[in-house]
């Protein structure tokens, strides 16, 4: 009898699918191994399988994905929580915008920015959130140490399939442990020498939580956006959408005269830091496409 399940993790060519009566360890049928050459099966994929015994099965079909986060690869998400630290490592607008672009690129409709380690920040954390709130992103300010914002984060996660993405050392695993101590995820510290976090999460895995799932993922300090076109990059900055009356169409919002986005930056309607991050990413894309 055919059954359906959601892939929780993939390890050594074995995928672990959540079925109605528990987790089943499945392998791909031989013909599927030959036909699946794009990205392979990733956590979050929905698969149809047949049981070999109570605990093992063979995958017969993989359903089409609703969305896919490129790195770390996780499919069929309902929400992405981009997690940065208020300090240690200090948030850089270019790094934050890079992760937000990747989130926008994934096709996941709900994107939340979480600013963690607020207990270590000496200023008003709202100043860190201002540019992203103005861009339309919900922002949560949290501290895994003091408990600030943890209740709001719990509410945000309930019933969703949520991936935590962001640079290493921002406290993603610590936040999940604060949300639910039974998760017992491994945590690490920020390297004083390189100013970045050490990877404590080795692979992406869906963890059942509050009628949904949370995904703890490896952190990455750099993300490649070279497959984006300039037009696709522009679409990943939602605050640009209200400023489309440029003299030229299409407009890259970089060198062209009479650009509505650049005018909005000068008028203070669009964050200069966000625009500068956009310009840097645009230059990066153009350089790599040459």
Image: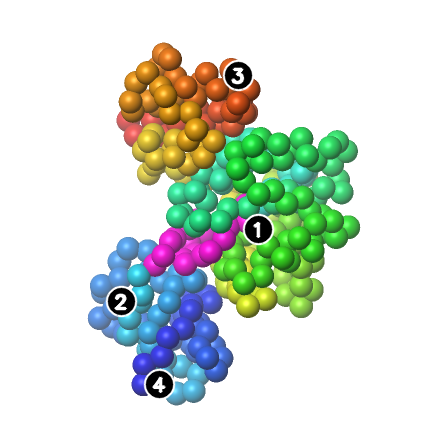
- Distance from Cα at disc 2 to Cα at disc 3: 55 Å
**Does label 4 or label 1 sit earlier along the sequence?**
4
**Does label 1 or label 2 sit earlier along the sequence?**
2
Highlighted magenta segment, given as a residue range: 65-82
Give percent across and percent down for residue 235.
Answer: 38, 35
Q: Mark 1: which secondary structure?
A: loop
Q: How many marks?
A: 4
Nearer to us of marks 3 and 4 is 3
- Distance from Cα at disc 2 to Cα at disc 4: 18 Å
Residue 199 is marked as 1
Residue 126 is marked as none
Contact between labelled residues 4 and 2, with CB atoms less than 8 Å apart: no
- For label 4, the residue is 52
Give percent across and percent down for residue 163.
Answer: 51, 54
Label 2: how many residues lie within 10 Å, few (<14), some (14-19) or many (20+)? few
Label 1: how many residues lie within 10 Å, few (<14), some (14-19) or many (20+)? some
């Amino acid at each position: 009898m055919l059954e359906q399940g959601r892939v929780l993790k993939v390890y050594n060519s074995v995928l672990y699918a959540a079925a109605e009566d528990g987790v089943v360890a499945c392998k791909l049928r031989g013909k599927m191994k030959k036909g699946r050459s794009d990205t392979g099966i990733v956590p979050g994929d929905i698969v149809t399988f047949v049981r070999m015994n109570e605990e093992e099965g063979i995958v017969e079909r993989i359903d089409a994905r609703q969305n896919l986060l490129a790195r770390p690869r996780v499919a069929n998400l309902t929400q992405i929580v981009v997690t940065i630290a208020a300090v240690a490592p200090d948030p850089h607008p270019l790094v934050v915008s890079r992760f937000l672009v990747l989130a926008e690129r994934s096709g996941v409709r709900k994107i939340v920015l979480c600013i963690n380690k607020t207990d270590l920040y000496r200023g008003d954390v709202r100043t860190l959130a201002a540019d992203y709130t103005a861009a339309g992103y919900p922002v949560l300010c949290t501290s895994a140490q003091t408990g600030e914002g943890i209740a709001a984060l719990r509410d945000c996660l309930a019933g969703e399939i949520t991936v935590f993405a962001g640079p290493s050392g921002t406290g993603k695993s610590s936040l999940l442990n604060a949300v639910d101590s039974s998760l017992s995820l491994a945590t690490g510290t920020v390297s004083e020498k390189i100013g970045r976090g050490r990877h404590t999460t080795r692979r992406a895995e869906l963890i059942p939580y509050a009628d949904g799932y949370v995904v703890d993922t490896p952190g990455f300090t750099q993300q490649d956006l070279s497959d984006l076109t300039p037009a696709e990059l522009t679409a990943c900055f939602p605050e640009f959408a209200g400023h489309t009356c440029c003299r030229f169409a299409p407009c890259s919002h970089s060198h062209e005269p009479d650009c509505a986005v650049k005018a909005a930056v000068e008028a203070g309607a669009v964050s200069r830091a966000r625009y500068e991050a956009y310009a840097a990413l645009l230059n990066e894309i153009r350089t790599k496409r040459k």
